[in-house]
Image (spheres, coloured by chain):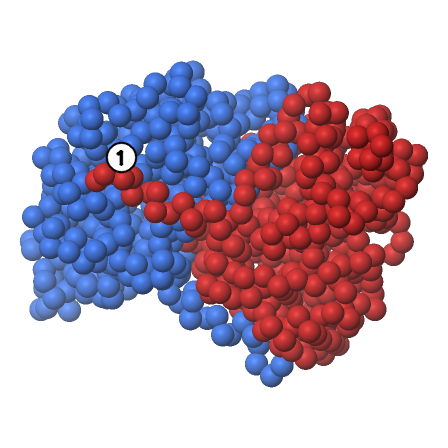
Chain colours: A red, B blue
Amino acid sequence: MSTPWHHRYAQRTQRMGSSMIRELLKLTQKPEIISFAGGLPAPEMFPVEAFEAATQRVLRQHGSEALQYSTTEGYLPLRELIVEKMGRYGIEASVDNVLITSGSQQALDLIGKLLINPGDLILTEQPTYLGALQAWRAYQAEFSTVPIDDDGLRIDLLEEALCGGPKFMYVLPNFQNPGGVTLSYERRLALIDIADRYGVPIIEDDPYGELRFEGEHLPPLVVLDADKLNGRQYTNHSEPHSYFKGNVIYMSTFSKTLAPGLRLGWIVAPASVIQHCVMAKQGMDLHTSSFVQMVAYEVAKDGFLAEHVRQIRQVYRERRDIMLAAMAEFFPPGVRWTQPKGGLFLWVTLPEGMDSTAVLQDAIAHNVAFVPGATFYPEDAQQTNSFRLNFSNATPEQIWEGIGRLGRVLEKVLDPVLV
Amino acid sequence: MSTPWHHRYAQRTQRMGSSMIRELLKLTQKPEIISFAGGLPAPEMFPVEAFEAATQRVLRQHGSEALQYSTTEGYLPLRELIVEKMGRYGIEASVDNVLITSGSQQALDLIGKLLINPGDLILTEQPTYLGALQAWRAYQAEFSTVPIDDDGLRIDLLEEALCGGPKFMYVLPNFQNPGGVTLSYERRLALIDIADRYGVPIIEDDPYGELRFEGEHLPPLVVLDADKLNGRQYTNHSEPHSYFKGNVIYMSTFSKTLAPGLRLGWIVAPASVIQHCVMAKQGMDLHTSSFVQMVAYEVAKDGFLAEHVRQIRQVYRERRDIMLAAMAEFFPPGVRWTQPKGGLFLWVTLPEGMDSTAVLQDAIAHNVAFVPGATFYPEDAQQTNSFRLNFSNATPEQIWEGIGRLGRVLEKVLDPVLV
């Protein structure tokens, strides 16, 4: 063999997207940089001692069971905890509607494996979560997009996009990544209505829904869809093989409420969909770590998680407030940004024609970092004048200082006389 | 919408194979059954106390780092430990040649994602590991097979099969699952030679290689391939971007030496292949649990794992010996079986024309279980007269009793007068 056989496969991984996230994660590790680039939770909020105690209890009470192979569906007490947790948001599922995944990234991969054939069109928000694009590019999906504004997906532009015949729609209704915006109640109802009319399923990705700082929680799409179909579509918990009908697959994660290093997420869907997911997951990793699932359950149970989430909300709200105040103080005129009511991110828009990737180079020279907006578009280099800021992973002092640095960079960039 | 949209996708998961493994795992949980069906390690060998101590050290020394997002490649000290471990078997890799996966099942899925296009032909041993078939059916692979005998893959039949133009070959050289046989040194050399001549890459799956009870360790295919290409192809550890050329992707796992509930495996491959794998894995689960990787490293380090593997070998050797002795005692004439020199499994062949799935029904009625051989063939219902026995997951007493029960079932089945 003269040339290595594996060179032939380079093109496929190029389709899977650049290594931008990975490179940025590396960047955030340099101590001199104040990074608003990653999507990392605040590590000082991780309940490290609770994990230590929980691990000890798991190993003493369950012993080798915590280290043995287990079922693909996931650890039953953890699925029960998720059912209860979902119930608080109006999602009346049973354990047969819940599959534990290795992070919600695996849920995205799993959905791609089940649903996408090469060339299939997927409809996403514009901008949207980079990880979804990565997962689905690997299945040779094509993408069409509908812009978002301060109330989320532009429903007025949806029907035209649906005429392209997408396989499914992918929506982050709460504190969207990267936009920070939330889909309004009226638009949720309209979205469900249109999706039903066109027969196009919705993938509802909700990693941040619990991290609302203010205002009222809005019902998940999966609930509105069920309401529309027949009042209450969900059967109750006592039924052994309950399922709900419906047009929505819901997914969430423990990454933003407990700890991302666990790699624990879940899918809520009709039981028949979950059964297909289970078969697909068997071929992907057999099951998610039983050890991690048992430890997570042991940490989360008895109301600990709900109380812990309340503390995270307080801390993140304070950080968002300081970031917004610092932007008002330091950012020059002509720069706009979203006002997220929860989550981890906000979205900055520079005057038209500006290139945020070029700004990032200046910013890094001043030891501050963000993610250029172009990263979050399926198409290449669309809307280059925006960028994403994360407010969960820096202290209030770092946020004030970092936004100050960024403000000075933007002032120079926006004032050609000073350049 | 009149019919649920997701019914359209039922066919795809049917392609992914039956839920046989899952159903069998459920079966093994019934306490009255002595099960030789699963592929479970002996849980009483799991170092539960070492895990407890290691988890405490990880959380006290690393704190929130153990719970945060980390890099896709895997925890560097764990990759270094794997490099050292591989070195003891002659595989001179560097950390750039190692990717941590969520169990070796994920490595199989990852290889499918990178290499398989719909309709691609994959060459496997006959019988072969069910999980590989499951992983690759999802990418719409087709399979061709070459039989094994007591010395592993029948090299004399290989070239004919290669004329079908397979994308790659999948081989388990050590204590094969399900056959229990080991590829001889002469055949390893011949395999490398033929693979190189035909330009067909080899996926070398080695979950059991360390569990050799007797005889000399045989060099991995990845080593023989490198030797053939140019003496030593591997660069040394001090080179920042070392890679090795070669025609072999090697994979292994901590599931059989430390604990399967961790879901920790690894791939060793040329650095350029690893880079593609990293990009693909990003879209699959971002990374394997950082918590689990750090705990596994903390347990395995400082020679603990090597010593622990010595103990596992002793225990499994004793169980194999008892199973072989019990079979000699209780199995009727006309039944043959393999003599594994390591691993977890052996393979039983009944007289031609017999159906081991029917025998399993009788066996379950007598509270003993195995996996029918047909499960391990890509084609439907080939060679129905064989079955797999696992000897790692039952005590010596259970093995003697269970093989006794199975012997009585086989005696009845083989003697039509008694039926």
Residue at 28%, 61% (x, y): give it: B142
Residue at 54%, 40% (x, y): give it: A19
Image side of residue B403 versus residue B102, left or right: left
The image shows residue A190 at horizontal and vertical percentages of 77, 72
Which image quadrant: the C terminus of chain A? top right
**Helix, strand or loop for disc 1:** loop
Question: Quick one: B287 or A403, which is closer to the camera?
Answer: A403
Please tell me whether residue B386 is drawn above or below residue A398 in the rendered image.
Answer: below
Residue A245 visible in the shown view: no
Question: Quick one: A37 or B304, which is closer to the camera?
Answer: A37
Which image quadrant: the N terminus of chain A? top left
Please tell me whether residue A23 is drawn above or below residue B398 in the rendered image.
Answer: above
Residue B270 visible in the shown view: yes
Residue at 58%, 34% (x, y): give it: A23
The image shows residue B312 at horizontal and vertical percentages of 32, 29
Q: Quadrant of residue A394?
A: top right
Going by the numbered disc 1, the residue's amino acid type is: Gly
Q: Furthest-bottom residue in view?
A: B2
Q: Quadrant of residue A392?
A: top right
The image shows residue A352 at horizontal and vertical percentages of 78, 49
Residue at 26%, 58% (x, y): give it: B121
The image shows residue A83 at horizontal and vertical percentages of 67, 57
Q: Which residue is mark 1?
A: B246
Question: Quick one: B187 or B116, which is closer to the camera?
Answer: B116
Q: Crowdedness of circle 1 by 10 Å Cα count: few (<14), some, many (20+)?
A: many
Image side of residue A268 versus residue A140, left or right: right
Image side of residue B148 versus residue B377, left or right: left
Q: Chain of mark 1?
A: B
